[in-house]
Amino acid sequence: MKKLQVGLLAGLWLLLAGCDENAVYKGIDDIKDGTWYINNTPEFTFEIADTTATYSIYYNIRNSVSYPYYNLYIRRYLLDETGKMLESKQDELTLLDPKTGKPYGDGLGDLFDHRISMMKKYRFSRSGKYTIRLRQYMRQNPLPEIYSVGVTVEKDL
């Protein structure tokens, strides 16, 4: 039953994600069995053509209400097409209210989707391909109840 719920939510998420007209790129990586190992580092490669524009980049996280923490530490890496590291930063994402445990984000059943800002008004210096690599940075390995992670890149209007 839980796999059916996950499948239906994944389909709904992809359908809704396709409706975003400002998105230059949207990528989602499903985490097998909802268990995110430290050595599992999803990569998202996208192309930037307009270097005069600024871009906002978002994390897309799906977790269950059984996720054992209120937050999620992620280390992100931004690389250019030559593999040169442009940025490496650790972010803390708050998925549940720390006091009440009430999930943030949009949910259906016991799964919740989060869209959390990663970078605002970022200007890419060159056109070309860029890669964002994500690594869970929690003390628990593997990290349970994380079902997908992703990245959305939007051109600012």
Image (spheres, grey):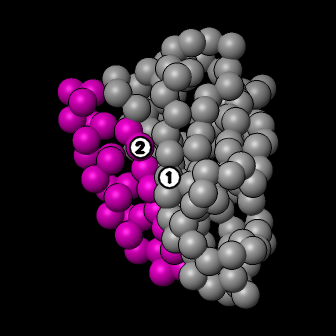
The residue at which mark 1 appears reads as 44
Question: 43 and 138: which one is in front?
Answer: 43
Whether label 1 touches label 2, CB < 8 Å: yes
Q: Residues within 10 Å of mark 2 (few under 14, many from 20)?
A: some
Horizontal side of 116 relative to 19 (left or right) equals right
Which residue extends farthest front?
Answer: 82
What residue did someone put label 2 on?
29
Q: Is residue 12 magenta?
A: yes
The answer for how far apart the CA atoms under marks 1 and 2 are is 9 Å
The answer to whether 139 is drawn above or below residue 32 in the figure is above
Give the secondary structure at mark 2.
strand
Q: Could you tell me residue 16's position as x and y percent?
A: 39, 65
User: Horizontally, is 63 left or right of 132 in the view?
Assistant: left
Three-letter amino acid code at disc 1? Phe
Point 63% across, 85% down: residue = 50
Place of residue 105 in the rendered image (x, y in percent of width and height, measured from the top left): 58, 47
Q: Residue at x 62, y 77 (%)?
A: 127
Q: Report whether residue 102 is seen.
A: no
- Image coordinates of residue 12 in percent, x first then y, are 32, 56
What's under tag 2, amino acid-wise?
A: Asp
Pointer 1: residues within 10 angstroms few (<14), some, or many (20+)?
A: some
Asked whether, in this view, residue 31 is left or right of residue 38, the answer is left
In percent of width and height, residue 106 lies at 52, 50
**Which corner quadrant holds the C terminus?**
bottom right
Q: How many marks?
A: 2
Q: In the picture shown, does residue 3 fall above or below 154?
A: above
Give the magenta range: 1-30
